[in-house]
């Protein structure tokens, strides 16, 4: 047909990928230096919560968010195998249709018991938990006041729900109050916070922030994805540690960190919470988690209720690594250890990738985090400790960082 455009003309007029050109160039420039692709690593075999085979060699894992080391717990694995035998590999249906099995109710009850709350709702991922809860409870005409460093799933939940979104400077109580003060009287208000922020590993001043939110009649949602299982006397998160959990309306969490499997959840004491099962689209229109996954999650959550020794050991690991890296001369994201995440600030992406590769050659895997996901356009090597890391492994890690840092020129 003579009126059809050539392929080149179509590309010029309708290349929907052109918006990604800066990222494509950045990746190409990085790989042209000869560095291994830091975003394409393959775990060839996982030997334990702290060791895997990468590029044919044993590698210490320091970037997996497996905070409590539950992925190889014998009871957890046995529960998953039994559920596979008893219920098969998947539900092939939504929770509101054929996708609610006894295991889904059991894990929701375990979450209620863990948090001492009345309602729990399980999603297929942690991302969907934020997406679903935020977009459903705050809609057109409502206001969401949130920390500027909030996770992508929080921002996407805001966008999907069509509420007015009002961000404030990270962890700035005064800035949050200024935003709340300007919201029209009588409007629906939701304040969204995180217990631990995953990039730098810093915690929020939840007690003060929640008090301000309640002063202005706002409901409060706290994402405890990176603190659940570890922080707080019972592992309920930063809100528990700061003594304000009873003032939180919704707690969001995930099974893919301390629990050691996959899935997300929301717990609440709100008397109308159960209606969410009928109106929350990412819950209603998604197949439910496989029986083996909810069985492993249920077993893990119940074991985390009695994991005080593990929590204490993880704190010791965090303090030791933070001090060791600081003493070696690295710049860290927090002055003191605040969580199981310790971020090491790199001068730029190229040297950050070089440091990442040098650590991999040493036998250590960490996360390379880059803009725009990071605050203030920082490049970070993000370390997430595990309760199963031995004291000896932590000392090994400090040595690996020191040698790699000197090789790459990050430290003197």
Image: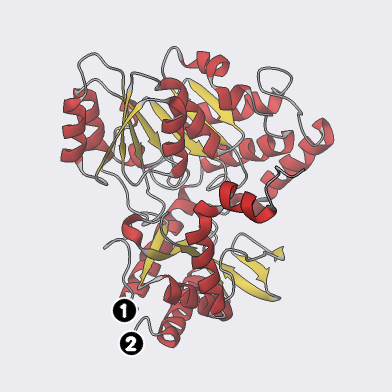
Q: Which mark is residue 329?
A: 1
N-term mark: 1 or 2: 1
Residue 271 in sight from this viewpoint = yes
Q: Which mark is residue 316?
A: none
Is 14 displayed left or right of 311 in the figure? right
Name the spot of residue 165 as percent of width and height, x first.
33, 31
> What residue sits 39% from the left and 85% below the top?
409
* Quadrant in the picture for residue 214: top left
The residue nearer to you, when weighing 64 against 17, is: 17
The residue nearer to you, when weighing 171 against 154, is: 154
Is 136 displayed left or right of 76 in the figure? left
> What residue sits 71% from the left and 17% below the top?
97
The image quadrant where one finds the C terminus is: bottom left
Q: Which residue is mark 2?
A: 412
The image quadrant where one finds the N terminus is: top right
Q: Are marks 1 and 2 in contact (CB under 8 Å)?
A: yes
The crowding category of the residue bearing disc 1, from other C-alpha atoms within 10 Å (few below 14, some 14 to 19, many at least 20), is few
Name the spot of residue 383 as percent of width and height, x first.
46, 63
> What residue sits 43% from the left and 12% below the top?
271
The crowding category of the residue bearing disc 2, from other C-alpha atoms within 10 Å (few below 14, some 14 to 19, many at least 20), is few
The residue nearer to you, when weighing 352 against 308, is: 352
Name the spot of residue 243 as percent of width and height, x first.
29, 35
Name the spot of residue 25 as percent of width and height, x first.
51, 66
């Amino acid at each position: 047909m003579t009126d059809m455009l050539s392929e080149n003309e179509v590309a010029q007029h309708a290349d929907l990928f052109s918006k990604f050109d800066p990222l494509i160039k950045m990746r190409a420039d990085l790989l042209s230096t000869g560095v291994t692709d830091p975003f394409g690593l393959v775990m060839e075999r996982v030997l334990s919560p702290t060791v895997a085979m990468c590029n044919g060699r044993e590698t210490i894992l320091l970037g997996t968010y497996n905070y409590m080391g539950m992925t190889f717990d014998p009871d957890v694995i046995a529960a998953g195998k039994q559920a596979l035998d008893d219920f098969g590999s998947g539900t092939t249906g939504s929770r509101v249709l054929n996708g609610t099995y006894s295991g889904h109710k059991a894990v929701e009850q375990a979450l209620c018991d863990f948090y001492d709350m009345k309602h729990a709702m399980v999603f297929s991922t942690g991302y969907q938990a934020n997406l679903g809860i935020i977009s459903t409870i705050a809609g057109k005409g409502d206001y969401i006041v949130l920390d500027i460093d909030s996770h992508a799933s929080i921002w996407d939940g805001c966008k999907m729900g069509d509420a007015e979104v009002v961000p404030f400077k990270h962890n700035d109580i005064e800035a949050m109050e200024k935003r709340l003060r300007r919201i029209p009287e009588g409007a629906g208000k939701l304040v969204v916070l995180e217990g631990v922020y995953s990039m730098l590993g810093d915690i929020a001043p939840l007690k003060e922030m929640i008090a301000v939110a309640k002063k202005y009649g706002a409901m409060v949602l706290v994402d405890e994805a990176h603190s659940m299982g570890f922080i707080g006397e019972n592992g309920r998160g930063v809100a528990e540690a700061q003594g304000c959990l009873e003032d939180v309306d919704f707690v969001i969490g995930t099974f893919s960190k301390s629990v050691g499997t996959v899935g997300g959840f929301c717990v609440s004491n709100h008397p109308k919470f159960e209606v969410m099962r009928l109106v929350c689209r990412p819950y209603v229109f998604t197949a439910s988690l496989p029986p083996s996954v909810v069985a492993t999650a249920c077993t893990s959550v119940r074991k985390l209720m009695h994991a005080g020794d593990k929590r204490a050991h993880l704190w010791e690991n965090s303090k030791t690594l933070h001090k060791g890296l600081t003493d070696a001369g690295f710049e860290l994201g927090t002055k003191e250890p605040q969580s199981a995440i310790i971020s090491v600030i790199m001068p730029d992406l190229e040297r950050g990738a070089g440091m990442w590769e040098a650590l991999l050659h040493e036998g250590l895997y960490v996360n390379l985090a880059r803009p725009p996901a990071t605050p203030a356009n920082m490049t970070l090597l993000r370390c997430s400790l595990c309760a199963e890391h031995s004291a000896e492994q932590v000392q090994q890690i400090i040595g690996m960082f020191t040698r790699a840092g000197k090789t790459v020129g990050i430290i003197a």
